[in-house]
Image (cartoon, coloured by chain):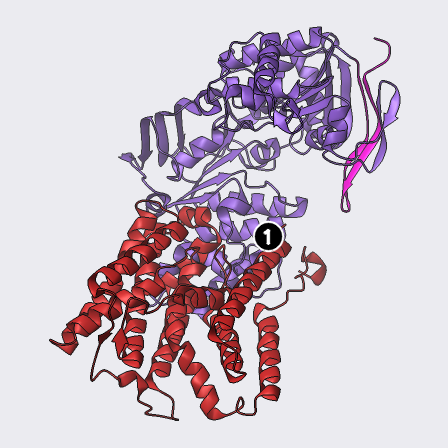
Amino acid sequence: MTQAFLEVRGLRKSFGEVEVLHGVDLDLPAGTVLALLGENGAGKSTLVRILAGDHRASAGTISVDGGSVHFADVAAARRLGIRLIHQEINVAPTLTAAENVILGSWPSRGGIVNKREALREAKRLLDDLGVDIPLEARASSLRLGERQILEIARALTGSARCLIFDEPTSALSDAESELLFKLIRSLRDRGLSIIYITHRLDEVFKVADTVCVLRDGQVAMNTAVAATNRADVVQAMVGHDVTHRDRTIALGTTPARPPVFELRGASSGIDFVDLDLGVSPGEVLVLYGKVGSGIAEAAEVLFGARRLDRGALILEGKPVRFKHPADAIAAGVGCLPGDRQSQAMFRPRSVAENLAAPVWRAIARAGLFVSPTSEAALYYKWHDALHIRSERKPEQLIWTLSGGNQQKVVLARWLQRQSKILVLVEPTRGVDVGARQEIYRVIRSAAQDGRAVVVATSDYEDAMELADRAIVMVRGRVVRELSGIELTTQELTRAAGRAAGEEAVA
Amino acid sequence: MTAAAIARPRRFAIPSWGALLLVLAAEMTMFGITSPYFFSWDNFVNIVTTVSVAGIIASAVTLLMVGGQLDLSVGSGVAATSFVLVSLSGTNMALAIAAALVVGLLIGLLNGLIVTVLRVNALIATLGTLALLRGLVLVFGHSNYLFITGFDWATYRPFLNVPLSVWVFLAAAVIAHLVMQRTVFGRQTYTLGSNPVAARLVGISSRRTVIGAFLLSGLCMAVAGLVLSSQLASVSGGTGTGLEISVITAVILGGTRLSGGQGTIPGTAIGLFVVAVMGNGLTLLNIDAPWQQVATGVLLILAVATDQWRESRDAA
């Protein structure tokens, strides 16, 4: 046990001009669980992808059993026993449980698959994990947790020595998560090394032996779990410099106006349950939570892209039903979806068209004919108002703009349409640092103009910069509501890292 | 707001027409050298006349493909509308024309409903109606030639010695161009083709847009049917066979993305000429018609390959 299974020294990684890992050191002895924590963009994913052979390091060394190794690709890392289990569950739904386990390592002779042996191997792997999954069941008929176990079993084929889990519980129910923790402990006891990426503090103290916190591409904390506590971990994640930073918006000026847009007792699948919230004109309400907390799904309901199983959506005191986003738009809701590339942008089209898409009918002559001049006029107006950095040509293609400027164009759609309510999901995702502040400014001024703004975000900086009030969600439930001086980075991170149902401790 | 503030410079993009115009010029030079007759007004009129039927349809199919859809049923649709026209022409010509137009619109509506309501992918849906309509024409036409008299309007040459069929094509192309560039419907078609998810989230109804595009395609089938019956003065079970291949080849060659969101009528027009000039030149060189089919096949594959290449270059 003196010799660590995996040793990482001075690991650096750059993408183009930007260095995202600035010299990371890490030791992973056999038979231990290391929890890897950090805010979004801290470098966790990059680090584990390098360890799994998916990315190549720019500098630094990786040693396995004391010998320096070089991973050319994922297969090379696999041969040394390192396996990454991705956050998204990748099973082939039409294949059986056994086939999914054995996928990629079919026992065969001369190209002919030995099915009986394959079944035996799959059964052995699943039995070792102490789970009871019918081998012949189609993966599509299994629950999410069971499908994940198939992936774990698949990762254990051959000579696995180190498993890396990337936020494995984000899609699991509490009971399924408990089962997973049991499984991880038993793997550890069999001598495997585990790296466990998570956002949830309670999980760290449940399964991990050591904890490593990354912040801005550097190791901010690396210690035994027994030697630390939650507050210290949060402190390490957030960093000293931002802990007591003053919020730039005026506190306590929220107008005491009745809410215009509310959810009452709203539930949608397992994504969120019994959610109550309301937003008033002139207010920015932040829904804060990590992936899988239900914030994005709640936002989808607000803009008509998802329906409620139970509960009601109330607009200006009256229950409403949105069957299609068009209904929400007609009712005065504007939306910024979470993934700009796939949900908001018309990539091959011009900036002017991207901006004017929701208002074409309104600006068209006789409701039919769009003149490029009126479209261009809109473009110039918002180009100047939002400081969109571009060639100032309406026909410039949107994809040639930077992420932040694309985001401003997409945001301008709804300002132009004078939507009374804005629902913004991850408004600064993939946005450069400079544009971030401008987007904050635009959102705040939209609220000052009397709009009601809901921001769903997993980025604490968004919450700190924007929120008049923040609702923190964990696994589909509200765990904390923060406003005024209570709304600090530490409180946010602490609340979001807490397990659902755990009592609020001030 | 200086140049340095612009994050990504515009990448050098080969304009899709630019490359195509080169191909066209190369073709014309080659045929111009090998055949003295090639560069004459009569031959030019010939070329435009041969593309008029495909061109009328390609005008609507460009819009349809920009919206991320596809229509393989156009050839069968032309046969079906022609058949209706010729069958009813004995009684009342005005009625026969109206019936052909209505049938065209119904074909478009059927395609649109299959794609939107039954959610069958457009490729398969229109492959189905291709077979279905062709089958119906063969069943009711008993595989015979049916003739139509007094319907040779499309061959009149009122102006510049150019036949009316060409003027109809020109009108269809101009109207399609204006619809695509200047109407809300056209704009929405582009957005739908470039990102259906985002289109839904800005309140665009994909159902209405897709059905509208298929209706236009159906209408153009009927108009093309009127032109073709007039040119041939007859209809048979084989009328319009393979038309979908020349139409789609021209549209893709003209720079319309298979995945939707990009494409223009001027591009399609150039695509049509690349195909037509090739056919015309090969005819002048006394090369058999089957070889022209081979050449069209090669062009189609090249067109799709360049489309894929452009797509992968622009990804990221």
Q: Position of residue B226 (x, y in %)?
A: 27, 75
Q: Residue at x 49, y 34 (%)?
A: A253
Judge from the rendering whether residue A12 lies leftward or rightward of residue B231; answer left or right: right
Q: Residue at x 50, y 13 (%)?
A: A133
Residue type highlighted by circle 1 = Asn
Instruction: Please give the residue where the numbered disc 1 appears in the rendered image.
Output: A405
Which residue is nearer to you in this view: A61 or B311?
A: B311
Colour assigned to chain B in the rendering is red
Q: Which residues are magenta?
A: A1-29
Q: Which chain is purple?
A: A
Regarding mark 1 in the picture, which secondary structure is present there? helix
Q: Main secondary structure of the magenta part?
A: strand
In the orientation shown, which residue stands out farthest toward the right? A67
Instruction: Count neighbours of disc 1 (C-alpha within 10 A) and say few if under 14, some if 14 to 19, many if 20 or more.
Output: many
Residue A395 in sight from this viewpoint? no
Q: Position of residue B227 (x, y in %)?
A: 30, 77
